[in-house]
Image (tube, helix red, strand yellow):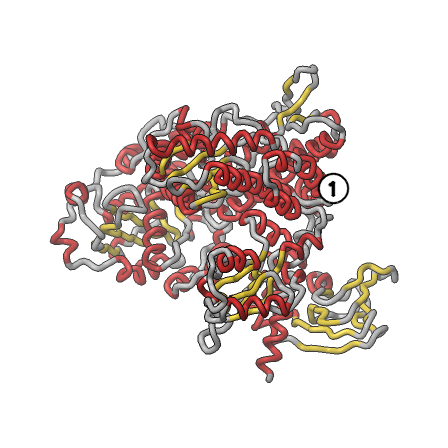
């Protein structure tokens, strides 16, 4: 019974912030330390100035918090916490507390509280709530009024789950649905075979179309007609996320899951009841229209929904997602109407949207960007006339619904963008492998892509191709970055606005072209560099934050700058609609207050990203996240402080020889490791392995002089990784061109262990580039050509180091260690902080 009680405590924690973001094992550990006390209404819980030893958690009841002056400060209810201010400052009660109702309080000891603050940034941020930058404060003020993020999806579950097993007859299922007055029933595994596992759902519509219309009998098993391609939502996801799921999938029933178990269903009506003028309500109306004229009549509702969300304080992310969902719904309905008029398609297809709609960032002043991905059996002579008519019907319909034609012709009506999947694969491969001015323009448009109708796996395959190829093609990323940096913010040397003049001689700034677009460009490049298929800019930033490409401070700046500039655009468009003007992206800074202009200037500042990564904190987090025991031990060994002088650092020179330069397709053939310090290179501790690759080409044999006989009895990479990771643990790697060692080890461990590898490095090529080309950020280094060679052999010549036998992992490691010693002796002090050298 004690275990059940602990489970109930941890389950309760799981429902409320900041505990809802903590791992289950952590919640269970907290529960084991909790003490409980009951307070009658009116009794004192905390007295001002008293010593405090615990964080207080309201399990039930209500508590009033007072200032020391006696003024009421706050009222707390179930799931709220108090006492944190005292624990954070001298362990003295700062705000007295009194039970407003009979209350049950959980006490979480101070040492547990301290550990939670130390281990989990989200927990620490919640309880500390320290000051933010002006821009961050402005952004948070913009979204504070919205309840869509605050309300959890579980709050909308209005009844117990109604379910059947797959062998239940459709007659019995229909009878149960009628008896329980539900429009949807869940199909679960039969008892004794994990009865909590959901197999599918059946709706009223399914019974009409798959049973009655298909002339099936009432004895048909429900498992034969159920929908199995399910979209589900977690019970602690927000109402906004539930809305987004319904918008993107155009679905009316959403199963709610807790720890893999289905706990209830949310219906469209549940959300509409909560949000009477919601985007979902409009999407429902869109799906009910039977003509283009009917769809066009909803334009006023679209603008009304937009204004309502703005005035209710929704965030830019929420508004962009909702408006994009509405745009998808218009597109989907037009495609359904087109198929009704033209008949079924002769071959499968997927309708692909691009740009802001694909990123879920669409606003009102927008045009249409779309394309058709066709099955590889597509024969232009037989099939293209159908798809030309389909594309024309949809494009014309979108134009009538307020989505203007693309001036650049990026529409499925253009035969170039109406092609089979194999052609699209060739398009993307060519754009990445051979970038030029024309193809780069296509890359900026087509590298934000998503399928909205038809065989969605076709577009998903293109997303994967983009992510995998871009990540390992630095020349393409360089070209993309060069173009991105051509878009300058509208600020002069003294941070004054540089404005354009419109036709009415007004001084204006294009908030999209000079504000949000450069930010999305920059975010897209970083996202491609880290190989993610995420499309939304905020989602991309989340992924980028887990890599080493951008410093956390720069990511935070990008996130808040994008949110702030987007909200300025959104409010500007909402004002235009209410004043009867055509919404656009042009603002007049002179109409803003001094504070608003300051925030605009701060948002327009591109982050320099010169801050160093906190590797020690990152390793702590990675140690908690890692699943493989070898990686857990590696991260648990930790990293030295960023302030440590280089002369005190244990270093490890590393070199990998590989069968090629593509970490996705090529293999490691040898590894060389050599421990050293600035004073001594310990050759006697060197380690070297020949690794059996998946294949060994003639070119690789010639280049590395490692033959088939050498690798015949060589170990596989997983066989040596234990020793490799043990040797790396606690040391700072030194390499020459980090993309090889980092990318190949990361990709190899993903293949063998199911998770990648992260570690700090000193890159002697990077250090040499600083001297030869100047000290620049990674984007600039990517873009500028070296004035002299910075290859390992050529770099050594500048320091009068002797020639060496290249292309052997151990000799290259030794050459790299020697080069670092020379670089430090020539250009730096041995006391330089390691943070100035690692990337």
Q: Residue furthest right?
A: 70
The residue lying toward the viewer, choosing from 432 and 442, is 442
- Residue 829, x across and y down, in percent: 43, 42
Q: Is residue 96 left or right of residue 317?
A: right
Left-right relation of 787 to 191: left
Residue at 17%, 45% in the rendered image = 697
Q: Which residue is mark 1?
A: 311
Query: Could you tell me which secondary element the residue under label 1 belongs to?
Result: helix
**Foreground residue among 89 and 305:** 305
Residue visible at 56% across and 44% down in the picture: 538
Instruction: Kindly give the residue lying farthest to the left in the view shown.
Output: 709
Q: Position of residue 741 (x, y in %)?
A: 33, 47
Picture quarter containing residue 110? bottom right
Number of marks in the image?
Answer: 1
The one of 797 and 306 positioned closer to us in this rendering: 306
Please give the name of the residue rendered at 47% of the width and 69% of the height, measured from the top-left corner.
219
């Amino acid at each position: 019974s004690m275990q059940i009680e602990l489970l109930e405590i941890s389950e309760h924690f799981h429902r409320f912030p900041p505990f809802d973001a903590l791992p289950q094992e952590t919640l269970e550990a907290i529960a084991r330390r909790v003490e409980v006390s009951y307070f009658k209404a009116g009794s004192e819980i905390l007295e001002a100035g008293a010593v405090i030893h615990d964080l207080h958690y309201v399990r039930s009841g209500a508590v009033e918090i007072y200032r020391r002056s006696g003024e009421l400060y706050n009222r707390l209810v179930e799931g709220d916490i108090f006492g944190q201010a005292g624990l954070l400052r001298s362990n003295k009660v700062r705000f007295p507390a009194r039970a407003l109702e009979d209350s049950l309080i959980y006490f979480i000891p101070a040492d547990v509280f301290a550990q939670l603050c130390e281990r989990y940034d989200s927990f620490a941020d919640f309880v500390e709530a320290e000051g933010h930058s002006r821009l961050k404060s402005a952004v948070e003020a913009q979204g504070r009024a919205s309840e869509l993020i605050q309300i959890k999806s579980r709050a909308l579950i209005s009844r117990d789950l109604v379910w059947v097993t797959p062998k239940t007859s459709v007659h019995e299922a229909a009878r149960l649905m009628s008896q329980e007055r539900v429009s949807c029933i869940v199909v679960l595994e039969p008892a004794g075979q994990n009865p909590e596992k959901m197999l599918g759902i059946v709706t009223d519509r399914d019974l009409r179309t798959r049973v009655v219309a298909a002339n099936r009998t009432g004895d048909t098993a429900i498992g034969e007609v159920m929908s199995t391609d399910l979209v589900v939502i977690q019970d602690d996801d927000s109402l906004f996320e539930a809305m987004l799921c319904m918008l993107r999938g155009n679905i009316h029933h959403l199963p709610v899951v807790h720890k893999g178990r289905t706990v209830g269903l949310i219906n469209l009506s549940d959300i509409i009841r909560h949000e009477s003028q919601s985007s979902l309500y409009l999407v429902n109306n869109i799906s009910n229209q039977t003509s283009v004229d009917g769809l066009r009549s909803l334009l006023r509702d679209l603008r009304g929904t937009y204004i309502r969300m703005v005035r209710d304080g929704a965030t830019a992310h929420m508004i962009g997602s909702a408006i994009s969902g509405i745009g998808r719904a218009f597109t989907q309905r037009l495609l359904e109407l087109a198929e009704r008029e033209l008949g079924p398609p002769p071959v499968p297809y997927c309708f692909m949207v691009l740009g802001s709609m694909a990123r879920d960032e669409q606003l009102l002043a927008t045009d249409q960007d779309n394309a058709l991905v066709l099955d590889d059996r597509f024969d232009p002579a037989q099939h293209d006339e159908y798809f030309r008519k389909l594309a024309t019907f949809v494009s014309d319909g979108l134009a009538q619904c307020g989505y203007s034609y693309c001036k650049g012709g990026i529409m499925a009506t253009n035969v170039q963008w109406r092609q089979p999947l194999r052609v699209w694969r060739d398009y993307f491969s060519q754009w990445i492998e051979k970038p030029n001015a024309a193809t780069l323009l296509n890359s900026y448009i087509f590298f934000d892509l998503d399928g909205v109708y038809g065989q969605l796996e076709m577009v998903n395959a293109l997303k994967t191709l983009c992510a995998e190829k871009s990540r390992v093609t630095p020349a393409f990323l360089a070209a993309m970055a060069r173009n991105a940096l051509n878009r300058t913010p509208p600020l002069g040397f003294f941070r004054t606005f540089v404005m354009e003049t419109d036709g009415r001689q007004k001084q204006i700034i294009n908030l999209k072209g000079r504000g949000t677009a450069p930010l999305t460009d920059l975010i897209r490049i970083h996202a491609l560099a880290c190989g993610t298929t995420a499309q939304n800019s905020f989602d991309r930033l989340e992924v980028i934050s887990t890599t080493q490409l951008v410093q956390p401070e720069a990511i935070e700046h990008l996130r808040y700058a994008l949110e702030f500039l987007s909200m300025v655009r959104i409010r500007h468009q909402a004002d235009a609609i209410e004043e009867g003007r055509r919404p656009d992206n042009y603002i007049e800074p002179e109409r803003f207050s001094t504070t608003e202009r300051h925030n605009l200037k701060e948002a327009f500042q591109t982050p320099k990203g010169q801050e160093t990564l906190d590797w020690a904190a990152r390793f702590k987090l990675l140690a908690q996240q890692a699943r493989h025991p070898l990686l857990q031990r590696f991260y648990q060994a930790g990293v030295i402080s960023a302030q440590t002088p280089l002369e005190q650092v244990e270093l490890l020179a590393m070199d990998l020889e590989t069968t090629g330069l593509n970490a996705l397709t090529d293999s490691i053939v040898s590894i060389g490791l050599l421990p050293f310090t600035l004073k001594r290179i310990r050759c006697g501790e060197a380690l070297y392995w020949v690794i059996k690759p998946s294949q060994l080409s003639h070119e690789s044999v010639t280049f590395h002089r490692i033959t088939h006989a050498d690798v015949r009895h060589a170990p596989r990479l997983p066989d040596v990784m234990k020793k490799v990771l043990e040797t790396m643990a606690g040391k700072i790697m030194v390499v020459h061109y980090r993309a090889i060692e980092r990318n190949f080890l990361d990709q190899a461990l993903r293949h063998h262990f199911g998770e990648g590898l992260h570690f700090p490095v000193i890159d002697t090529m990077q250090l040499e580039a600083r001297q030869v080309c100047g000290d620049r950020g990674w984007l600039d280094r990517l873009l500028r050509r070296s004035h002299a060679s910075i290859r390992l052999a050529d770099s050594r010549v500048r320091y009068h180091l002797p020639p060496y036998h290249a292309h052997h992992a151990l000799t290259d490691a030794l050459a790299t260690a020697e080069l670092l010693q020379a670089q430090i002796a020539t250009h730096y002090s041995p006391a330089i902080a390691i943070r100035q050298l690692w990337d």
